Amino acid sequence: MNILLLDKDFDYCKTLMNSMSALNDEIRISFIANSLKDLSYAYIADIIIADYEFYDTGLEIRFNNCKIIYLSEDPNNELAIPKDNIDYIIKSIERKSSNLSEPHIENLLYYEMVSLGYDLSLLGSKCVLEALKIMYYSDNALLHKSLVNDIYPKISENFGLSISVIKGNMNYATSKMLENINKEHLMQYFDYNLTGKVGVKSILHQIIKKLKSNY
């Protein structure tokens, strides 16, 4: 999970990071910004923790797919969490992370495919993305079932194409990606645990595994 901290007080940023790490080692701040100018449109954040002074500055519009948590030194501010209440900040992050929007999840899946080198203009790549969405929102048991019996029929229904066409195009898009990808990058993506032939199923499972481990 990528958490962005937006606060002008560097000492507070350091204190918050250390406190959060001590209380919950699964929640990490990935990026710190001290002003709106420090933020990049290209930066992908899941949750933004911002000082209340940045409220109503266009942050919500600029990062409309992000969950934003505001912090304030004023304990009576009903729109923000007290900056000294670390436990409440962590609980708010946990609640936000469990309710990420569907468009944001789709963007994350899209980003993973791009990082691997899928050509998103191909029909097969679009089918791969659809398969990932189905698998992400399914229970864990479905991840171990047959793609042909449990995943491809859903894609076929959504796209109005036969299962054989779906399967053939997904295999083609994946094979083209594997032809062009740097083998070292592929090994890194699989955490150097890659064994045997790489196919559609193993790629799908690894992408889902990476996203699930972050949420």
Image (cartoon, grey):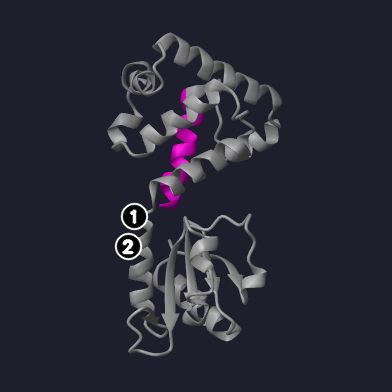
Q: Is residue 66 left or right of residue 9?
A: left
The answer to whether any part of residue 196 appears in the image is: no
| Residue drawn at x 37%, y 16% as measured from the top left | 148
What is the secondary structure assignment of the residue under circle 1?
A: loop
On residue 95, the disc is 2
Q: Check disc 1 and give the amino acid type.
A: Asn
Q: Is residue 176 above or below residue 187?
A: above
Percent x, y for residue 67?
43, 62
Which residue is located at x 61 percent, y 57 percent? 43
From the image, tell me which residue sits under label 1. Answer: 99
Say if mark 2 contacts mark 1, CB within 8 Å. yes
Residue 206 appears in the figure? yes
**Three-letter amino acid code at disc 2?**
Arg
The part of the chain drawn in magenta is 201-215
Say how many tags the image has: 2
As measured in the structure, the alpha-carbon distance from the residue carrying label 2 to the one carrying label 1 is 7 Å
Is residue 212 shown in magenta?
yes
Neighbour tally class for label 1: few under 14, some 14-19, many 20 plus, Cα within 10 Å:
few
